[in-house]
Image: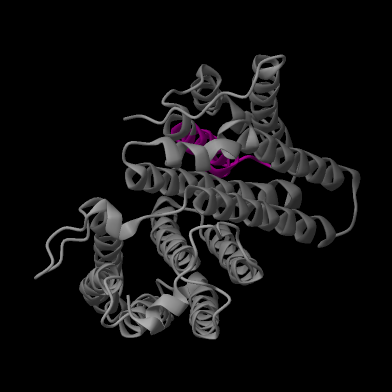
Amino acid sequence: MTDGAAQLVRGMEEERATFLDLFLDLVFVFALFRLSQGLLGHLSWSDAFQTLVLLLAVWWVWTQTAGVSDRFDPRRPAIQLLVIGSMFGSLVLAAAVPEAFGEHGLVFAGAYVAVQVGRSLFLVIVTRGDERQRPEVRVLFWYGVSAVPWIAGAVVQGWPRGVLWALAVAVDYMAPRLGWPTPGLGRASAAEFAISGEFLAERHRQYFIIALGELILVTGLAFTSDGFEADRSAAAVVAFATTVLLWRIYIHRAGEALGGAVAAAPDPLRIAVLAIYAHLVMVAGIVAISVGDELVIEDPFGHTQPAWVAVILGGPALFLAGRATFEYVVFGRVSRDRVAGVLVLAAISPATIFLPPVLVAAAAALVLAGIAVSDAARARGRPPEPPSPPG
């Protein structure tokens, strides 16, 4: 290892997140808020697809930038400069979200490509002459590949942009699953992308908390936007209770054991990737819940439209699906109450169009409360379950 690269590498004993990591997360509170506000203003299936594509891009920027602090020492000025530069690019990207499929498409795609390619190019340069350059070259190659549909999509309008950006996202997400195959290097070995399970677990817990922070932000803004009437207050109580229940269900057992699961897995990288995808599904659910909360607080006893039901009940269902996947990643099984919760939410959805929005939200909160109570009852008097990830 060259002296320059050695100085930038993070020590194996340093597994905790730093203040720089927490600083990075602040931008993504804003990004999640912009995503939910964009979906709120255009609540349709096509706009839901567009929001999903944008969420996948935002999530991947955070995942890849957060991973820098796992491999390199965030106390080094060069790494701090890299992360702060990525933060600014992410801020521009988040600002462009609401009109990313409109007039700000080139701003969004340009910011995304600049962050991903720029970060990778920087790491390739600072690791030159060192074995750690190989994984950085792989990542840079694949971001160069995905940059083509990102930029091509930005210069066209309508459905072609959606198709090209969906292709770009698919390239970004499939590359690690395929082992980052690169001309002249072949597929990557697991050792090239060695990760710290504890660091991965802590960073994803922190991201989940900032997602809940976005929920609280939306609840507070909607609650105070037009007085403190009794019906709006009741809706705000339901929204806050839902946020608490999401937190409680997340942290129960699996939320605290991910680091051990990665360490115990025969293939740690596979378990890490599955955990990343499980958190993505949970965060998607939270974005939908955020939209539902604002709709409910703004008009608690109005007419419940089918699109409202989709976010008010679909958000918790998405969260539970992601949480069930997360549980499988950590323990190799899925609790029946997670599956039952999704089925109950799906079963009651047709009838809820006849209920006022606040009661639909209350029904979703009751389903989550039942799962939280079931978790607590099952855990009472039992020692913590050791991680048992799938082989």
Q: Is residue 314 visible?
A: no
What residue sits 76% from the left and 57% below the top?
222
What range is drawn magenta here? Answer: 303-326
Magenta highlight on residue 314: yes
On the image, the x and y values in percent for residue 235 come to: 78, 42
Residue 205, placed above or below residue 245: below
- Asked if one can make out residue 15 in the rendered structure from this viewpoint, the answer is yes
Instruction: Provide residue 100's location: percent of width, then percent of height.
Output: 43, 73
In the image, taking residue 52 as reference, residue 354 lies left or right, namely right
Q: Could you tell whether 34 is left or right of 281 in the image? A: right
Against 96, residue 350 (above or below) is above
Q: Find residue 246 and report its horizontal and vertical position in percent.
A: 65, 39
Depth order, front residue of 364/72: 72
Q: Is residue 319 left or right of residue 232?
A: left
Residue at the outermost left position:
184
Is residue 206 highlighted in magenta?
no
Which residue sits at x=70%, y=43%? Answer: 243
Q: Position of residue 348 (x, y in %)?
A: 56, 23
> Looking at the figure, which quarter contains the N terminus?
bottom left
At 31% from the left edge and 30% from the top edge, which residue is drawn?
391
Which quarter of the picture shows residue 80? bottom right
Q: How is the image coloured?
A: one colour
Q: Is residue 254 above or below residue 74?
A: above
What is the magenta segment's predominant secondary structure? helix
Q: Nearer the viewer, residue 143 or 230?
A: 143
Residue found at x 22% / y 60%:
180
Question: In the displayed structure, would residue 281 be above or below residue 52?
Answer: above
Q: How many numbered badges does the structure rendering display?
A: 0
